[in-house]
């Protein structure tokens, strides 16, 4: 099944790798390096089946956790998955927003999680 996925990843090389792996698996991907641009797209009417969000972003940028909270306020049921170099950054109530995958990403596990969280899996 093809899932439309918004990917937030500030590291260009990691973003290309994630995009390539997801597209190879048959998913449609829109890659963003900044949370503000991703939120502008959502506010402009772009809709995605799933949101794959990098947690840590450069200083001064909106991080993936903040974007997840904003998506939760704007959308009825945003399906979120976090990716991060430090899984301990996602704690407390944020853990309820979606599963957390540590970098380097295990793509077999990530693709399985995407299938579980995709709308038709509900």
Image (cartoon, helix red, strand yellow):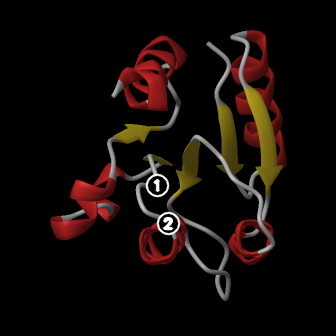
Q: Position of residue 82 (x, y in %)?
A: 45, 48
Instruction: Give the residue at x 40% y 37%.
Output: 101
Residue in the picture at 73% in, 78% down: 36
Q: Position of residue 71 (x, y in %)?
A: 51, 69
Give the quarter of the figure containing the N terminus: top right
Determine which of the numbered discs, if any, sits on residue 97 in the image: none
Q: Which residue is mark 1?
A: 78
Looking at the rendering, in which quadrant would you find the C terminus?
A: top left
Which element carries disc 1, helix, strand or loop?
Answer: loop
Q: Is the residue under label 2 in contact with that under label 1 (CB below 8 Å)?
A: yes
| Residue position for label 2 | 75
For the residue pair 107 and 86, the one nearer the viewer reads as: 107
Q: Residue at x 38, y 22 (%)?
A: 121
Element class at badge 2: loop
Number of numbered discs visible in the structure rendering: 2
Tell me: 4 left or right of 88: right
Q: Position of residue 89 (x, y in %)?
A: 33, 63
> Label 1 crowding class (10 Å Cα cut-off): few <14, some 14-19, many 20+?
many
The correct choice, above or below, for 80 with respect to 28 in the image is below
In screen coordinates, is 67 left or right of 45? left
Residue neighbourhood size for the residue with mark 2, other residues' Cα within 10 Å, grouped as few (<14), some (14–19), many (≥20): few
Query: For the residues marked 1 and 2, what is the alpha-carbon distance in whole angstroms?
Result: 6 Å
Task: Say above or below: 67 vs 84.
Answer: below
Q: Position of residue 85 (x, y in %)?
A: 47, 48
Q: In the picture provided, is 92 more to the left or to the right than 57?
A: left
């Amino acid at each position: 099944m093809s899932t439309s996925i918004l990917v937030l990843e500030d590291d260009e090389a990691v973003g290309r790798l994630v995009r390539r792996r997801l597209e190879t698996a048959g998913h449609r991907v829109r890659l963003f390096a900044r949370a503000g641009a991703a939120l502008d797209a959502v506010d402009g009417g772009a809709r995605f089946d799933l949101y794959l969000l990098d947690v840590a972003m450069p200083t001064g940028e909106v991080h993936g956790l903040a974007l997840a909270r904003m998506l939760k306020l704007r959308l009825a049921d945003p399906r979120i998955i976090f990716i991060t170099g430090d899984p301990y950054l996602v704690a407390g109530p944020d853990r309820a927003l979606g599963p957390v995958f540590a970098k380097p990403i295990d793509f077999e596990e990530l693709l399985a999680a995407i299938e579980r969280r995709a709308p038709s899996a509900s």
